[in-house]
Structures are given as structure tokens and as C-alpha cells.
Image (tube, rainbow, N blue to C red):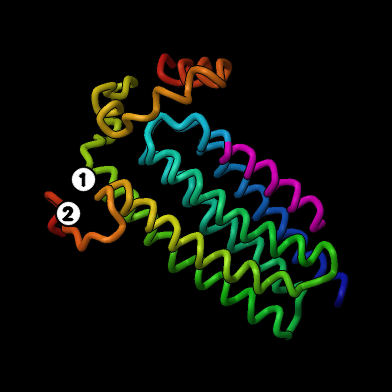
Amino acid sequence: MQILLDIVSWVLLLAGSAFALIGAVGLIRFPDVYARMHASGITDTLGAGLILAGMMIQGGFTLVTAKLILILIFLLFTSPTSTYALANAAYSRGLQPLLGGPEPDPAALEAADPASAIPGQAESGSVGSVSGEDKSS
Amino acid sequence: MFFAATLAILIAMGLALARALMGPTVYDRVLAVNTFGTKTVLLIALLGFLTGRPDFLDISLVYALINFIGTIAVLKLIKYGDLGTVGHAPKGEP
């Protein structure tokens, strides 16, 4: 019985880790703020949910499991709220979603973030080339 | 097995930090920091289980709340330029 619970919790932990990694890779590779919000939602729902469920099975019926359930409830309430606030702030600032065309509007990027040009080029040449590949592909 | 999950969370945190450093707009950076905070909550909980001290879950619980409040505060600061204003959105009637 203990072996069975261990196996189930390992499977849940590994699946949650895989979803967290997939969300992080999507956060790197997607071309737009709104698409990146979509990728970050994987980490917030399935990654956190599966990992916390795996830890709940390891914890058993104790105070630890109650705290884990509280963490899960807080995450499930706060992460859609903050993502909604982020999308609302970005859209009301005039950042248009990327529809069809591969090239984001440079004027909108400039208007949305006037300070982005200063730290970008000096310290990270390879990072700049990666984002250049993203735009051209 | 907790070790593998911790390692995966650490790699994902590194990727989110890379997006926070190279994000073109400031909203990319806020989104990456928010994701980084969610992963930090999971990392603290996993480290508590890994070292056999589940008392870390209290810190993880507090971190989940502070992460949310911090994200909302940073967004308000970006949108209005001031944390004290009782602002309304310029064109955003729901």
C-alpha cells in the first residue's frame, strides 16, 4: 500500500515538473506578451497543482496537507487575477496582440517600455541574437 | 524523486529569469517575475520535503500572498506612476 502511494505521488511529481518545464520553455519561445501569458498559465495551474498533489499524498492526513491545500487554493485564486490585471494593463496601455503577422509593432514596444533599450544591448549580446531569431522566424 | 522535481523547478526558474532579463516590454518582465514567484513557492515547499522539514510550508504560504500583492503593486505603479492614486482606467470600462 505504501509502495502504491509512493508510485502515485512520484508520477504526480514528475508530471508536474514536466508541465513546469513546458511552461518555462513556452515563456521563452512564444513571440508575444499575451501568448506568453498562455504559457505561464500552464505552470500556474497544472504544474503547481500536480506537484502540490504529489506532496499531499506524501504528507498524508496531517497539518502538512492542510497547508498544501491552502497554498493550492491561494495559487488558484491569485494567479488568474494577476494575469487578468497584467493583460488589462498591457491592453489599456496600447500593446496590441500579435495577429497573423510575425513582426511586432516597434512603435508599440517603444511606447510600452521606454527603458527597455538601455540595459538590453550592453550586457547580453547572445540574448539579443536569440530574440532577433524569434522575430525573423 | 523530490530531487528531480526540485531540479526541474530550478531549470524552469532559470528560463523564467532569462525571459525577465531579455523581455522586450515591461509586461514581459512582470509576467516572468510572477511566474518566477509561483515557482519559488513550489521550490520552497519541495525543499521542505527534501530536507525532511515541512515547517517551510508556512514560508511558502506567505510567499504566495506576497507574490500576488507585489505583482499587483508593480502593475499599478507602471499604469499610474504612483502607488497612492485612486485611479480609473483611461478607456477600460468592463
- Amino acid type at circle 2 is Ala
Work out whether A62 lies above or below A34: below
Contact? badges 1 and 2 (CB < 8 Å): yes
- Stretch in magenta: B1-17
Dot 2: what SS? loop
Q: Is residue A79 left or right of residue A93?
A: right
Q: Residues within 10 Å of mark 2 (few under 14, many from 20)?
A: few
Above-or-below relation of A60 to B3:
below
Q: Quadrant of residue A67?
A: bottom right
Q: Magenta-highlighted stretch: main secondary structure? A: helix
- Name the residue: 61% across, 49% down: A20
Q: Quadrant of the N terminus of chain B?
A: bottom right
Q: Nearest the camera: A27 or B75?
A: B75
Element type where label 1 sits in the image: helix
Q: Residue at x 57, y 64 (%)?
A: B63
Chain letter for mark 2:
B
The percent position of residue A80, horizontal first and vertical second, equals 40, 60
Rendering coords of residue A23 (x, y %): 55, 44
Residue at mark 1: A92
Q: Where is mark 2, residue-wise? A: B89
Instruction: Give the quarter of the figure containing the C terminus of chain B.
Output: bottom left
Give the residue displayed 43% in from the left and 40% down from the top. A36
Residue A23 magenta-drawn?
A: no
Say whether residue A117 is left or right of residue B61. Answer: left
- Could you say where residue A115 lies in the image, as x and y percent from the top left? 37, 30
